Amino acid sequence: MDFETRAIHEGQEPDPTTGALTTPIYLTSTYVQDAVGEHKGYDYSRVANPTRTALQQCLASLESAEHGVAFASGLGAVTTIMHLLNPGDRMVLIADVYGGVYRMTTQVYEPKGYVFDYLPAAEFDELGSHLDERTRIVWIETPSNPMLNIVDIEKAAEAAHAAGAILVVDNTFATPYLQRPLELGADIVVHSTTKYLGGHSDVVGGFAATNDPTIAERLLFLQKSLGAVPGPLDCWLVLRGIKTLAVRMRQHCHNAHAISGFLERHPRVEQVLYPGLPRHPGHAIAAKQMRDFGGMISFLAESEEEAAAFVASTKIFKLAESLGGVESLIELPARMTHASTAEGPFAAPRNLIRLSVGLESAEDLLVDLEAAFAKVAAGTHSVRTV
Ligand SMILES: *Cc1c(COP(=O)(O)O)cnc(C)c1O
């Protein structure tokens, strides 16, 4: 069945006891057993819950995966995957990795003896020469957050495998509608379902999927043993979001195309980072491995002051962290989502603005941005600080 059909039906048969069309929110911590150990697959909700099972099956199917594991947050998924490593093991990450992952590697795991190296996206062509026998995991985001860098997933998987490592792809920006890393050779795909998958800025969640039975078994073991599990209501919200993922992503992409073109032509913009633009260095690879280019756009203002003034001047684009919801958001990564990278060698540029383009009318969004540029130019922007 096609993606859109599976998004609505996979793992979501009508409820066997009542016929309820929509998957119930199974608000229960425990399950009655007929005799010791005799139950219907559920004994305790940290281990398994039917609403969570539905989400795991549906999302695994969308990622072309056999196995899916849901978590309480994107970082809950990441930290669980980190437990595939042992102290002394090495991991190579894309340099502009999500700020929260960078904070985790530098401030939580590095002090415990894990080894992390950060490779700029442009150097992934020579990924193989940066791997050694201690390297267990290669970790990429593509498109990356917030620089919208692109990495060739197929090539990264080949290089990782040749060195005896596995490839993990954070697919939060693209979603499985636009890109399916496991089909391109990745071993694990990871998500913050807080973003496009939930899609309505009303839930925090995470997810990982794989086709490797050994990794799947270990992740399921770690899910129950470490306990970073999502509650049934959270699972239900993500399941509901996924049903409209395809139509939402089409509109996110449509709006982002219009806005990226507008920004590229604007005299107050230094540079636009959007893989859909032909001059983006990752455009050809993105066109090869993605169905479309997504709803995230970053751009460089002329100065840090101008960037701060701009994000305080839009009306429809709300100044907020996070992304992937129906509403358009604007932020300064260097001082907000990626503040934890500020002291490191891969800090986000201070004049960088990141847009999460929502589902409002593209025309209204363009008018909003144009008005903000005019306010900044006239010096009449509010002095709201971030
Ligand atoms: C938000 C995000 C995360 C972390 O997810 P949470 O749900 O906030 O814990 C990880 N990776 C990327 C790319 C993200 O945007």
Image: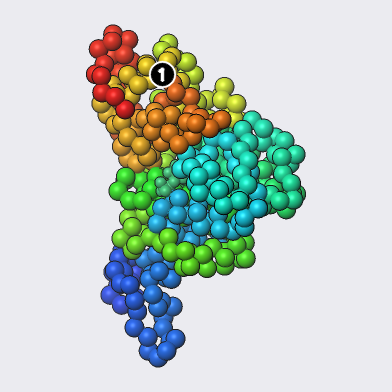
Q: Quadrant of ligand 1?
A: top left
Q: For the point 50% across and 61% down, which residue is it?
A: 68
Q: For the point 53% across and 43% down, which residue is it?
A: 106
Secondary structure beneath dot 1 equals helix
Is 339 situated above or below 29? above
- Which image quarter: residue 248? top left
Is 286 situated above or below 63? above
Query: Would you name the residue on which mark 1 appears?
Result: 304
Front-most of residues 271 and 66:
271
Is 365 situated above or below 326? above
**Where residue 56 appears, x then y in whole percent?**
45, 62
**Where residue 114 appears, x then y in whole percent?**
61, 50
Q: For the point 62% across and 57% down, which residue is it?
A: 86
Mark 1 residue type: Glu
Q: For the point 36% across and 54% down, which residue is it?
A: 238
**Where residue 201 appears, x then y in whole percent?**
32, 45
Front-most of residues 17 and 34:
34
Front-most of residues 61 and 220:
220
The answer, for residue 8, to whether it is visible in the render is no
Is residue 129 rendered to the left or right of residue 109?
Answer: right
The answer, for residue 250, to whether it is visible in the render is yes
Is residue 86 rendered to the left or right of residue 378?
Answer: right
